[in-house]
Amino acid sequence: MSKINSACLTPIPNANAAVVFVQEQYLFQYVEDGIEHVKYVSPAAIRAAWSEEAIDSGWLEPDTLRCGVSAKGAWAVRLIRPVQRRTLQFSKATMEDSIAPSLTLRLPPLVLAGINGKYHLWAVKEETVTGGTQLYYAPFPNVYGDEHICFGSNPVPAVSDGGMRRALDLFFESPFTTASVSGKSRRYPEDVRLMLRQHALEAAPDLPFPVDDLMPYRATPTLDQALEMLLRR
């Protein structure tokens, strides 16, 4: 490999086509009938041109909002509708902890985002979700600052290996601890578990989750912003 001191690329002798990178854009430069042409091309077009392997999403999970492949691996975004009540398990921190071992209640609509083997969870107020939908903190323990789910020592497969379904099942089947319980409820800002307990004990079986109690997710307020941040960093 030769090295040439230059602020710009040096033309390659006898080259009749090239893909170049200019200010975060891809350009396809080629000669046709003695005339030089330059046009912008998308990353997807470049990938398709260089890859002989077919890309197939396979059968998508219901309510999959978006999916793709980035430098971090396969990713997907899925809406979890509150179609039924769920039973949540809780591990007590102390003998004085007033949280019952299990609570059965209706949950708010949720959005699960998986990027490779890392999963993030938010709440939303409506079941119609777009890129501009306002996000809220998921009203559960064990979901941390950037809304990534902590699974403890439990292994979770990557998105490309069916991890979206497994991550959701594992999240709701494992006992919640007292980790990351604050700042997720307007009525009980110190401990969101108290809000879950109140809703489970006082609400009628089919009463929806009180979405007005959700706390806005201010780091990246919309779904588009959150996904862009996760894919970029």
Image: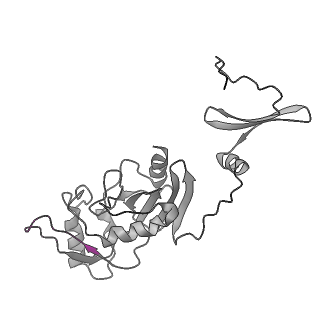
Image quadrant in which you'd find residue 90? bottom left
Classify residue 203 as left or right of residue 44: left
What secondary structure is the stretch in magenta mostly built from?
A: loop
Q: Is residue 85 above or below residue 152?
A: below
Residue 94 in view (yes/no): yes
- The stretch in magenta equals 88-99
Image quadrant in which you'd find residue 80? bottom left
Judged from this view, the residue extending furthest toward the bottom is: 205
> Residue at point 26% right, 62% down?
141
Colouring rule applied to residues: one colour
Judged from this view, the residue extending furthest toward the left is: 96
Q: Is residue 95 above or below residue 48?
A: below
Residue 127 in view (yes/no): no
The percent coordinates of residue 210 (x first, y second) are: 30, 69
Judged from this view, the residue extending furthest toward the front is: 1
> Residue at point 65% right, 59% down?
55
Q: Is residue 161 above or below residue 204?
A: above
The percent coordinates of residue 230 (x first, y second) are: 45, 49
Q: Which quadrant does the N terminus fall into?
A: top right
The percent coordinates of residue 229 (x first, y second) are: 45, 46
Q: Which quadrant does the C terminus fall into?
A: top left
